Every structure is written in structure tokens, then in C-alpha cells.
């Protein structure tokens, strides 16, 4: 009776190759997370610990950065500070420990809400319009389809900042400068080409027979699209939404150029957080930490669709 020896197939990686790949992936993940972990740690430090040299790997945790991020403060003399009544809460007490008094809330909350409105609003529009356009290019006989698809793709070949000055002049002329609508429309236009190209690939992978069978059963074309095609394309829609949101959420140049007041988003606001004697690094780190959270949560919630979407259509039967 001969013993059976398990040997890897011609396309199956050896155990040594698997270990090597795992070590490389883990090392890359650790190196990628170091800046993010350091930012989070800095957000829970005092201003003195955040600029200590050599840097402190372990420091006493503090919420000074988050208090400074959400408040506006004013420095007063020690005599005036001692004459004040006791602090009403821990926020005011934290402010007084810096020999300051609370003057009111900061503008970060408004800027953060602007980012949420602009980021998710433009993502919704980009995905909605991109889904309809991708379905049309995938299912209908569009004259010059290849030329139109290349034209759509060509809009991504030029960096958006290259048209910043014309966009600024145009927005100023039509009254869209420093408005939520202006940023939503601009980010939608920039993301639309990416959405169309990504979603067309997913639409092409959905068999036409599904919607043809639905129309035979009495559905209209639109009903078949909504009830048959959209559920099948959920993976592609989720993947496209993640990429569109990442761009709109992190975009800095247009937000800096086109906004300065009521519609300003978080990216151009966070670097302007000034502390006494220079930048308030804990407050900036706190703002960055909070700024990363929505995209992180959105990506984690859709991670299954993202992994499926990246490999969708890679294997054909």
C-alpha cells in the first residue's frame, strides 16, 4: 500500500511561497498603519508631549486636542483666571488648565457637516447617473459607443487641478462660489467618468436573459432594470460608491480654491488650526482622526462588496 504525498498543483503556490506572501502583506499593512496610528495617538496627547524630542511612544492620555478642536478660546492673566467662578464642566476645566477661557464653539463642526453633505451628496449623484449611463452603454445600440466611452475616459486623463482657474472664474460668474451645490456638481462631474467605466464592466457581466425573462413576464424595461439589474449590480455599485466617496471626501485643491466660508469642507480647514506659538498638533490630529472615520466606517460596511467587486469578472466560465 503506497503512501499518498500531497503535492501542490502547477498553479497552486507552495507553502514557502504562501509564507513569504503573508509576511510581505503583513509588513506592508504594518508600515501603512504606522502614520495613522501615530495620528490617533497624537490626538490624545498634550501639546507639549506632541512635540517632545525624542518622540514619546507612551504618554499620559489627554483630551486637550479634542477640546481645542471644538472650542474657541481666549488667553487671560492668572489674576483674572483666579477671580472666575469654578468651571461648570470638564471642557471648561480643561480650557482653564491652559490659562484660557472658553469663548465659544469652533467652526470645525460646521466644516465637518459640509464634508458629509458634499461627499455623500456627490457620491449619490455620481453613482446614480453613472449607473444609468453604464446601463445604456451596455444594453443599447448607442451610435459611436466606443468614441463616447473614450471621450468619457479622456476626461480623467487631465488632472482636475489643471482646470481650477477656469472653473473658479465660471463659478464666480454664475454665483456658485462658496456653495454646497457648486462643490457637489463639480465632484459629481469629476467622478462621473470613473463611475461610468466601472459600472459598465459590471453591467456587461450581467446576462441579458435575466431582464428579457422579466420583460416576457410583463415587466417594463425600467421595472426590469430596477428589480433585476440593480440587485445583480449591487456589488459594482458599492465598489464605485467607495471610490467616488474617497475622492470627494479627500479633495483639497478645489475645496480650497472655491470655498472660504459657509461651504468650506474639512480638508482646507484642518491645516488652519492654530495654537499658541504655532500649530496645535493634538487638535489637528484630532480633526484628522474624526475626518477619517466616516470613510473608514463606510468602507468597512461595504467591505464584502468591495472584495467581490475587485475580482468580479476575473474568472469566466
Image (cartoon, rainbow, N blue to C red):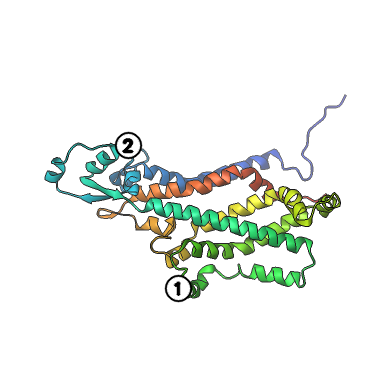
State whether residue 149 is above or below residue 230. below
Which secondary structure lies at badge 2?
loop
Say which of 182 and 281 sits in front: 182
Rendering coords of residue 114 (x, y %): 45, 55
Mark 2 crowdedness (10 Å alpha carbons): few <14, some 14-19, many ≥20 = few
Q: Residue at x 76, y 49 (%)?
A: 228
Count of numbered labels shown in the rendering: 2
Rendering coords of residue 124 (x, y %): 59, 55
Q: Is residue 314 at all visible to an observer of this figure?
A: no
Q: Which residue is mark 2?
A: 60
Q: Which residue is mark 1?
A: 172
Which secondary structure lies at badge 1?
helix
Q: Earlier in the sequence, mark 2 or mark 1?
A: 2
Q: Residue at x 69, y 38 (%)?
A: 15
Say which of 113 and 256 sits in front: 113
State whether residue 2 is above or below residue 161. above
Give the distance between the C-alpha atoms of the residues marked 2 and 1, in whole angstroms.
Answer: 49 Å
Mark 1 crowdedness (10 Å alpha carbons): few <14, some 14-19, many ≥20 = few
Q: Residue at x 82, y 54 (%)?
A: 208
Q: Quadrant of residue 41?
A: top left
Rendering coords of residue 110 (x, y %): 40, 53
Say which of 210 and 274 sits in front: 210
Rendering coords of residue 294 (x, y %): 50, 47
State whether residue 11 is above or below residue 200. above
Q: Residue furthest right?
A: 1
Q: Residue furthest top?
A: 1
Q: Quadrant of residue 136?
A: bottom right
In the rendered structure, the answer to whether residue 244 lies left or right of residue 170 reads right
Amino acid at each position: 500500500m503506497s503512501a499518498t504525498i500531497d503535492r501542490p498543483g502547477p498553479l497552486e503556490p507552495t507553502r514557502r511561497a504562501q509564507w513569504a506572501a503573508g509576511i510581505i502583506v503583513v509588513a506592508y499593512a504594518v508600515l501603512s498603519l504606522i502614520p495613522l496610528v501615530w495620528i490617533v495617538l497624537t490626538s490624545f496627547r498634550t501639546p507639549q508631549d506632541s512635540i517632545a524630542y525624542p518622540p514619546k511612544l507612551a504618554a499620559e492620555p489627554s483630551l486637550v486636542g479634542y477640546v481645542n478642536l471644538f472650542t474657541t478660546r481666549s488667553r487671560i492673566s492668572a489674576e483674572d483666571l483666579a477671580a472666575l467662578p469654578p468651571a461648570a464642566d470638564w471642557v471648561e476645566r480643561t480650557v482653564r488648565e491652559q490659562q484660557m477661557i472658553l469663548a465659544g464653539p469652533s467652526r470645525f463642526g460646521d466644516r465637518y457637516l459640509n464634508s458629509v453633505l458634499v461627499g455623500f451628496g456627490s457620491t449619490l449623484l455620481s453613482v446614480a447617473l453613472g449607473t444609468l449611463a453604464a446601463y445604456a452603454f451596455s444594453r443599447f445600440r448607442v451610435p459611436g459607443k466606443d468614441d463616447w466611452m473614450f471621450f468619457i475616459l479622456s476626461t480623467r486623463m487631465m488632472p482636475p487641478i489643471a482646470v481650477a482657474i477656469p472653473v473658479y472664474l465660471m463659478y464666480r460668474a454664475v454665483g456658485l462660489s462658496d456653495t454646497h451645490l457648486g462643490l457637489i456638481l463639480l465632484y459629481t462631474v469629476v467622478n462621473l467618468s470613473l463611475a461610468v467605466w466601472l459600472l459598465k464592466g459590471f453591467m456587461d457581466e450581467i446576462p441579458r436573459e435575466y431582464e428579457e425573462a422579466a420583460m416576457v413576464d410583463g415587466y417594463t424595461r425600467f421595472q426590469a432594470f430596477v428589480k433585476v439589474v440593480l440587485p445583480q449590480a449591487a456589488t459594482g455599485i458599492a465598489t464605485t460608491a467607495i471610490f467616488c466617496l474617497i475622492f470627494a471626501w479627500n479633495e483639497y485643491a478645489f475645496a480650497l480654491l472655491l470655498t472660504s466660508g459657509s461651504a468650506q469642507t474639512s480638508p482646507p480647514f484642518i491645516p488652519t488650526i492654530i495654537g499658541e506659538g504655532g500649530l496645535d498638533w493634538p487638535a489637528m490630529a484630532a480633526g484628522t482622526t474624526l475626518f477619517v472615520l466616516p470613510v473608514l466606517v463606510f468602507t468597512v460596511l461595504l467591505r464584502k462588496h468591495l472584495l467581490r467587486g475587485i475580482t468580479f469578472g476575473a474568472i469566466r466560465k
